Amino acid sequence: MGKGAKNKSKKSKAATKAKALERAAVEAADLSGKAAKKAKKKKAKAKEARAAAEVEVASWSDLLRVEPGFALADIDPASTPGFDGGKKDAEQVMEDLQKRLADLQERLFAESKGGGRRSILLVVQGMDTSGKGGIMRHVVGAVDPQGVDITSFKAPSAEEKKHPFLWRIRKALPRPGQIGVFDRSHYEDVLIVRVHELVPRSTWSRRYAQINRFEQGVVEDGTVIVKVMLHLSSDEQKARLTERLHRGDKYWKYNPGDVDERGYWADYMEAYQAALEKCSTAVAPWHVVPCDHKWYARLAVTNLLLEQLEAMDPRWPAADFDVEAERERLAMTP
């Protein structure tokens, strides 16, 4: 059993221990003298165990969510919050997570065939080489392609520039039953646009509030939004770019412009800090995932997506035909 799987067992044991101690404390509540002192100690232990159990079961969303007072600079890109195992442990855990993810995605898709209107949108942002492609392959790639719609947003076309910046985003929102994935997103319009001063400050500074209103509406229409910033260190990015230049099978991934963009690293971090602060809302919070370890980023994003799908609890639609009659009819065929 991997350490990640062991952690789940520890959570269950902590919760069980807390309940047992609480029962013992209640049973001893009417005692006096030495027995009363023991009861008091049991109550204290029960309180501690209860607190420990609550810490153990903290969700990935709780661990990685951007809250008030958040500082991106305080997050170690090489850390692995919520997981004390290594790459092999993560791979073992991922097998089970991917199966659960695929099952829930199928349910969500089937639910829409019965009239359901819900969907989920995964927004993935990060610096170049942060592993967005790996998220597409190892996380989103684990589910049925017919229930997934991936949009990779590049620089806006001439036609798109004629419209407000959210125009092309609205067109790409997932349909009912779909898991929509944005590889980059509307946040480019407060990131690269801000860093390179592609529009006046007065224009991009208004966009934070516009984004919040837009996302509020998307959620009200039945789409759950999961926003992930893949947090990469400058050193790790340099190492990944260097690898691409030393492997013939990686040349196609290399973009000379990535080296130019490294010169704006501090500006990008400042832009990300502002976007995370201003646009992490109750209905669409941001999550920062350290990604110097690719395997951890995939594990974390899988868990974030899985948690939301489990909370949605999509249901298989009821049959819109007479099941018994169809069974009999089918049995009569050759």
Image: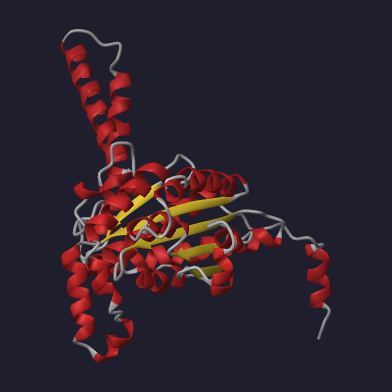
Q: Nearer the viewer, residue 83 or 125?
A: 125
Query: What's the residue at 21%, 58% (across, down)?
Result: 77
Quarter of the image that includes the C terminus = bottom right
Quarter of the image that includes the N terminus = bottom left
Quadrant in the picture for residue 79: bottom left
Where's residue 317, x and y in %? 68, 58
Q: Nearer the viewer, residue 223 or 305?
A: 223
Query: What's the residue at 83%, 78% (across, down)?
Result: 332
The colour scheme used here is: secondary structure
Where's residue 186, x and y in %? 47, 58
User: Is residue 302 visible to the viewer in this orientation of the structure?
Assistant: no
Query: What's the residue at 37%, 49% (across, down)?
Result: 275
Where's residue 57, x and y in %? 32, 43
Q: Is residue 314 left or right of residue 115?
A: left
Q: Is residue 148 left or right of residue 12?
A: right
Kindly give the residue lying farthest to the bottom in the view shown.
Answer: 248
Where's residue 245, x and y in %? 21, 84
